[in-house]
Every structure is written in structure tokens, then in C-alpha cells.
Image (cartoon, grey):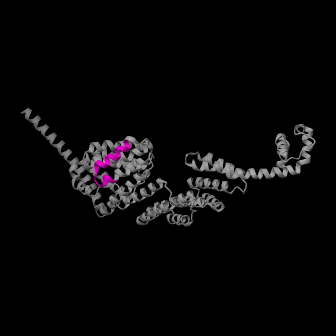
Amino acid sequence: MLQACYILIKNKSFAINLLAKITIFPSDHTFQTYTTNSMYTTLLKRGLAFSLFFYMSLNLFAQYNICDNEVSKQIEEIGLKYQKLDKAKLKAEVDSLLQILPDSCHRSLMLANIVLARYYKDYSTFDKADQHFDTALKLSKEDPDNKYTKHLLSLRAIMKKVQGESEKAIDILDQGIAIPCHQDSLHCQKYDIALRINKASMLIGINKYEEAIDIFLEGEKKMKSYGFKDSIYYVSLYTGIGNIYTNNISDHEKALSYRRKCLKYMPKGHQATYRVYNNLGTCFVALMNYDSAAYYYNKTIEETKNTRDLIIPHQGIGSIESQKKNFKKAIISYQKALDVASSLGRKRYIQTSRGYLGKALYLDGQYESAHNQFENIFNNIEGYDHEDYELEYLKRYAYLSKVSLVDPSLSMDIHTHMLFKDSLNNAETKLKLDESSGRLLEQILRDSVEMQVLLKENEAEKVKNYRLSTALLITGLLL
């Protein structure tokens, strides 16, 4: 109330306009006569009680509009641009808004708490993130549309997965999936599909591949029942299924069918088109249809404007050339993949590109260069998000290149053994080679050491023979 009085006294024009609107002027005076200081004071005294009541009502109405419109729009904009914004400034801005927002601004408060929950999640301050998620969830109950509740549960599940609690994350996603959507709420329906996509992805992470496929297909049915045409959601669903068939089940024919569905539903001109091209190329390589694979890889190389899309096609072209035993061409492509990955700082792709390059160099007989690539991988192993079977595989090639530096013939039998089970992407490799792994590496090391000893002995023998022949030659000259 005091603040309202202060505003009225300090803003004469505002007060006069306000009072004019509530018509408390005497009938014998015009509006202009009340613009003087004395008349302003008289006017203010006569209408203060009613004007303050009106002002507070107007203020509450304006505050309601600001809560539901201006502030919430501002915070929603922050949420949409979250990944691109400076996180410290973002937090300061949202904290400032929370200081001035009254408890009645449910939607704005909810959105602010969502942003802060994401902020604390990203900085691994999970307790504080949970507090803001709890607050936001309570406030989301005020919204008749369940879209925010679904969205919040999805975000919270992702945080639990980051914490290594995949089973708990899946339970949270199931809670979100169980919440119904109004038939006209497109946003809620999209979050419903997103929950299923996230659940399937988490099931993949705990090796429940068939169950994950079922959830993806359930999402497809839901989309059709909702009747919305957002094709990028179909692309996400089919990409997930294709990835399972490619990476986990090794059914490349089925993977190819879902990759083709992705291409069918991909919006024209969408940047993700090139990822679909790359996935198609990878399928065709696995099916040994190298011409089709090269076609899609080259489409990406020629058309994409995003450098990140270039790593996979360069690796893919390298694999095609390796299969054709054009190792020098393969080396060029793998080197391009490594250069792109290095320029982007993509650690996993740097290491996989080195692995492919090292193998191609080895097969081309460039054993020292191959050995250097493998050494680089193991010297930077902390930055390599590797699977155990990939590491075993790379260790084998590292030892092969080391042995071949001594004598290439020593590794020929082992070389043949490697070719039968040659893959950087097949988890079965480790199982197939485990039985012989220890003996194989011990044999390589033993052969390597024995050969080096033998070489030293041979060198010593050569020096001895050289000295003997020199002595005989000198003796012959003296005779």
C-alpha cells in the first residue's frame, strides 16, 4: 500500500490519468484545472482511498498478465536456447527473476525451476537439481495440460541415467508414459513419444535390445493413433531400431529396411539427412554392397555443410578400399577422418580413426607407422570411450605391428587368425578370441624377444666373420 502511495505521489501524470479514468472529478471543473500542483493535491486527497484500491487491483491484473505472458515467455526463450547460452549468466538471470516473482506466478516459477534443475544437473550438483525438479513438478500440477509434467519426468530420468541409475530412470519414464494426454494437446503427445524414445534408448544401455525395439514400435503406433505428422519423430524411432539391428543384433538386412524408412520420412533439407546417408552406407558395407555404400558416403562428402558429418563417410570409404585391398587409398581416407575428428576434438572418433588407420598401415606393410598409431591410442587411452572387445582387438594389431618390425614372416599365421574375425564394431570378437588371447599375446612377445636376441647374435656373428675375413685378407696381402 505504501509503495502504491509513493508511486502515485511521484508520478503526477500517471495519477491524474488514473483518477480521470475512475471519474472522480467535480462536475464544475474541467480536466485541465486539475493539472496544477494545488489541485493535484486536492484531487489526491479526495480520491486517495478509491484510487489506491483501483491501483492495487490494476497492479494485480498487470502482474497476472506479466506472470503468464511476459516473464514466462522470457524464461521459455531461455529454456529453448539453454545449450547455447552462457550458463553463469543464464543462472544469474533466472535467479533474479525468482527474486521478484510472487508465489501466484505458477507457470513462470515452474519454468524457472526447470532451467535451474537443468543447470545443476549439467554441473553434477544432483541434490540441488532434485530440489528444483521437485518444485517444478509440484507447480506443473497447476497446469491442466500434462505436457510439463511429462517433460519434467523425462529430464529427471536423463539425470538419473547420468548418475548411473538406469533402472530408476526407466521407472521415472514409465511414470511419465502413464500420464494421459488430452486429445487436442499436441505438445503433450510429442512429449509422450519422447518419453518412449528415451526409455528405449535406456533399455539399449542395459542390453535389453528386443524390449527396446518393442518400445520404439509402441511409439510408432502411438504416433499414428495421435494422427500428427511430425516426421522427424518417425526418423528418431526408425534410427533407434536401425541402430539396434546394426550395432547389437548384427541383422544388417533389417537395419537397412529401417534406414530406408528414415530417408523416406526425413524432412527435405534437414541436416540429419547426412547422418541417414552415413547409416545407409554403413549397412551396405556390412552387406558387401560397396558401390551403394560409396554412393551414400560420397553424397554426404559432396553435399553436407556440417564438418561433423564427414568423419563417418571418410572412415567408410577407407573400409571399402580396405576390403578391395587398396590399402594406400584406404590410408588416405582414414587420414582424412582422423584430421576431421582432430579438428573437432572428437576423442572417440580420433581413436577409432587411428585404429582403422593403424590397421590399414599394417596391412600395407608400413609396420612402423602402424605401430606409432597404436602407441598413440594407448598413450591417450583415458580419452577413449572404448569397449573392452575393441581394446583387445587394437592390442592384437599393436603386437602384430611390433612383431612385424622384427620380421614380417613371424606374424603371418596370426595375421590370418585376425582376418577371420576382423571387426572394430562386433562385440562377438572378444568372445571368439578370449580363449586364445593370453597364449597369443605371450607367443607374440616371446617371439619378438627371441627374434631380437637372435638378430643381436647374428649381428655379432657378422662382425666376427667380418673381422676374420679382414684378418685373412691382410695375411694374404703380406704373403
Could you tell me residue 399's position as x and y percent? Answer: 30, 52
- Residue 447 in sight from this viewpoint: yes
Q: Is residue 239 left or right of residue 458?
A: right
Q: In the image, what residue occupies the spot 16% across and 40% down?
A: 466
Q: In the image, what residue occupies the spot 26% across and 52% down?
A: 448
Quadrant of the rendered structure where residue 105 is? bottom right
Query: Which SS does the magenta portion mostly show?
Result: helix
Could you tell me residue 101's position as x and y percent? Answer: 71, 52
Whether the magenta-drawn stretch holds residue 288 is answered as: yes
Whether the magenta-drawn stretch holds residue 60 is answered as: no
Task: Decide which of 29, 279 is in the foreground and name it.
Answer: 29
Q: Is residue 52 left or right of residue 410?
A: right
Quadrant of the rendered structure where residue 175 is? bottom right
- Residue 161 in sight from this viewpoint: no
Q: In the image, what residue occupies the spot 85% across and 49% down?
A: 51
Quadrant containing the C terminus is top left
Residue stretch in magenta: 283-301
